Image (cartoon, helix red, strand yellow):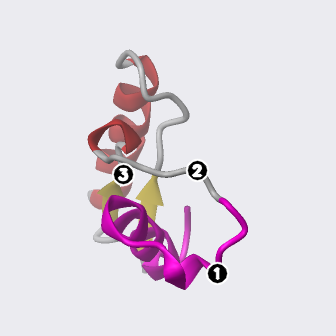
Amino acid sequence: MKIVGIPGSIAGTKTLNAVATVLDTIKETGIETELLNLSEYSLVFADSRDYRDYDGDTQIVIDKIMAAEVV
């Protein structure tokens, strides 16, 4: 199982730290986790394209989310 945690804010660190703490606790059980900090990516807004037609950081983020069993 893979869990991806996404902080709800790209500014500040409170939410980032909270999500990281939860993921660290889950990781201790042997479940694979990944923190997806959206502030580290240059994302484009959705514009009605098929999700497979994006590229760059946007496609990287899409791929990470699609590979997760839990977000």
Q: Position of residue 62 (x, y in %)?
A: 47, 70
At x 39%, y 43%, the residue is 38
Q: Is residue 34 left or right of residue 53?
A: left
Task: Residue 32: give its label.
Answer: none
| Displayed quadrant of residue 47 | bottom right
Q: Position of residue 8 (x, y in %)?
A: 55, 34
Quick one: SS at disc 3?
A: loop
Q: Position of residue 28 (x, y in %)?
A: 27, 57
Q: Is residue 32 left or right of residue 10?
A: left
* Residue range of the region highlighted in magenta in the rendering: 47-71
Work out whether 40 lies above or below 45: above
At x 35%, y 43%, the residue is 37
Q: Read off the residue under disc 3.
A: 36
Which residue type carries mark 3?
Answer: Leu
Q: Read off the residue under disc 2.
A: 45
Q: Read off the residue under disc 1.
A: 50
State the residue in front, 41 or 26.
41
Q: Position of residue 70 (x, y in %)?
A: 55, 69
